Image (tube, helix red, strand yellow):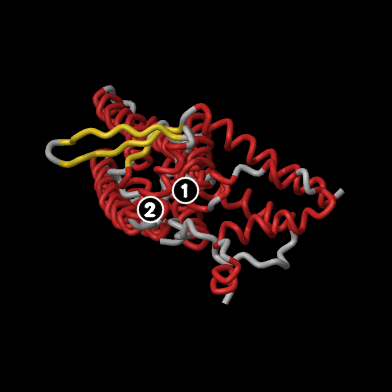
Amino acid sequence: MAKSNAARRGDGAEGGRRRTLAGVAGGRATLAPDLDKVIHERLRLAIVSALAVNPSLTFNELKALLKTSDGNLSVHARKLEDAGYILCAKSFEGRMPRTEYRLAAAGRRALERYLEHMESLIRMTRG
Amino acid sequence: MARTRPARAPRPPTEDVPLHDRAFENLAFIRDTMERAGAFTGVPGWGGVGMGLTALLAAWIAHRQPTVDRWLLVWLGEGWLAFAIGGLAMVRKAAAGDTPLTSRPGRRFVLAYTPPVLVGGLLTLALYRAGLVTLLPATWLLCYGAGVVTGGALSVPVVPVMGACFMVLGAAAVFLPAALGDLLLALGFGGLHLGFGWWIARRYGG
């Protein structure tokens, strides 16, 4: 039901989440524009978080860890790559292609900003 | 031990979720993902319980042996049996979860766990040849404990705690009379495996 509502609004799940943050923020609307939309999506947040505690992870390792499909992981990893948050290296292991991801410095900073953002939201809504 | 949680949000976005709840949820999600990505979650709970039971039996049998050689034979047999039980349980649990032994966290766990255990094996040979068999309980408990601490540093927090408990017992074995060796081995390889294995199985599964 929520999905169909979101579809009718034409903003999708991520848009719904953004609306929630902005709507609940109310008078503190300055917080919402700061939110990094690239990293806020769940799977992209999971990719960045997983890479933050590993020097690198292969496509298959990420897929198994995050329990997602090839297509889904591929799309979201590409978005992070386009944003400069992760680095992708393609090679061959024997005859098998191997894709390895690393967290870029910009990605680590983005994760740190996101964490600070969440913590500040908690502090402000409690205070 | 493998908690399976999809990367997708478990509930659809709604307008009535308080902002701080969502922020909390996001922070918990990040922490959970980091824990699963960085930790080896294949340490077996029920495998530990099995190892504990065989160790208690071994301690009872070993304590009744008339010669040192037969005493050592019982404990070496128990060592290989525990290795088989624990190894098989770990491989099965790791393969069923997020982190098989061949994954990066799995390989790092094996690399960290193995050296102290190998040292314990070599010291067993050296101490036996030197006629210092009474030092074996302390050596086994300390080396195994060190392996569990180092390997456990890459696993869930309870594992290194178990390793530290083994090392405490090993340290006690250094200073206590040799006659208490079997008791300390039973407390360590039996009691600690049973207790922590049960806890791991209940808290983290398998």
Q: Quadrant of residue B17?
A: bottom right
Neighbours of disc 2 within 10 Å: few (<14), some (14-19), many (20+)? many
Label 2: state its secondary structure: loop
Q: Amino acid at mark 2?
A: Asp
Q: Mark 1 belongs to which subunit?
A: B
Residue that appears at 46% across and 45% down:
A47
Vertical side of B176 occupied by B204: above or below: below
Residue closer to the observer: B181 or A25: A25
Point out residue B154 in the picture as x, y percentages from the top left corner. Answer: 45, 38
Inter-mark Cα distance, 2 to 1 = 8 Å
Residue denoted by label 2: B98
Residue that appears at 54% across and 71% down:
A3
Residue denoted by label 1: B36
Q: Compare marks 2 and 1 and give the one earlier in the sequence.
A: 1
Q: Mark 2 belongs to which subunit?
A: B
Q: Are marks 2 and 1 in contact (CB under 8 Å)?
A: yes
Q: Quadrant of residue B37?
A: top left
Residue placed furthest toward the right? A127
Side of B131 relative to A34 (left or right): left
Query: Is residue B65 among what the camera can see?
Result: no
Point out residue B2 in the picture as x, y percentages from the top left corner. Answer: 43, 56
Q: Amino acid at mark 1?
A: Arg
Point out residue A39 in the picture as x, y percentages from the top left corner. Answer: 55, 44
Point out residue B140 in the picture as x, y percentages from the top left corner. Answer: 38, 36
Side of A92 relative to A66 (left or right): left
